[in-house]
Image (cartoon, rainbow, N blue to C red):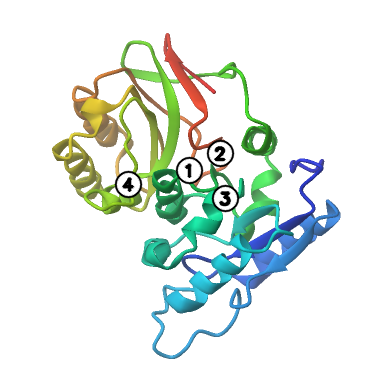
Amino acid sequence: MNNPFPLHVKTIGIAAPASGADRSRYEASRKLLDSFGIRIIEGKHLFETPAPDTPAYLSASDDARAEDLNSMIRNPEIDLILCLRGGYGTMRLLEKLDWDTLRMRDLPVVGFSDITALHLAMRSRAAGIPVAGQMAARLAEALAAETTLLSYRRALSVAFHGKFAADNAVPLTILKNGSAHGPLIPVNLTLLTALCGTPWLPDLSGSVLVIEDIGEPLRKLDRHLTQLALAGIPQRLAGLVFAQFTDCGDDAERLNLFRDFSGLVRGPVLSGLEFGHDLPSFSFVYGERAEIRNGNFYV
């Protein structure tokens, strides 16, 4: 497998802002990174046995997880932070992070799912470079799919070098026709709604929003979308793309829900993008230019 990371990426920090992961799956990814000649710096608490009073769904205490992230944010040798996995717990760290230092560094932070909380906060604070992409716990497995590998490479190139045009077309299902363009915001729906009403949610006006989720029954998806509507978010979007909704109820019923919600969106709405918890899955950089035109999604 060819190295998808830019050649100047020599050192990657691995942190677990949310839940823990199976070490054997991570080791396969670590070996892959080693084969690319990349030096790995693991968070001190990455696989540490949590204190007895730490909830089982967290990889470590809030202070320990924040300490690991902050040590990487402050370490000038680290070129990129790769999150271990999602799960839950990232939003508990937002008030504990060194935002001033991250704001001074063009440091990509790669992850998705629960890491959406960190990414949206980064966007709201204009700090670092949020990259929605595969994480360390299943990196080796995910990058074995060529579509995922090529998209991962593209996103990392955009993160470090930027891009000039949205020229990669992906045909999708049209729920509401039209054309739109704007900064791309790729999120987990549950985490997006969790940040509504907090100072950590950036202004989404004029954005092309991409949403995904996992394990949410239809009634909860309805609740999340209704909350977005009551917050006035769909009315301010340039466009909306529904991505993967893994284990989220009946496909036909879910599509009907999405179609109903589409009427609230100011611009076009598409469905069926390969982004989320299934493989293959695309990777994106927050804020990169995206376009919707003639049923195609361009990045």
Distance from the alpha carbon under mark 3 to that under mark 4: 20 Å
Q: Are marks 1 and 2 in contact (CB under 8 Å)?
A: yes
Q: Residue at x 30, y 40 (%)?
A: 250
| In front: label 3 or label 1 | 3
Q: Position of residue 136 (x, y in %)?
A: 63, 58
How far apart are the alpha carbons under marks 2 and 3?
A: 30 Å
Instruction: Decide: is 296 above or below 36.
Output: above
Q: Amino acid at mark 1?
A: Gly
> What's the mark number on residue 201?
4
Mark identifier at residue 263? none
Do labels 2 and 3 touch, CB within 8 Å?
no
Report the disc number at residue 276. 1
Secondary structure beneath dot 3 equals helix
Give me the disc on residue 281: 2
Q: Residue furthest left?
A: 230
For residue 160, which quarter of the picture? top right
Q: Which mark is residue 104?
A: 3
Residue at position x 51%, y 44% in the image: 278
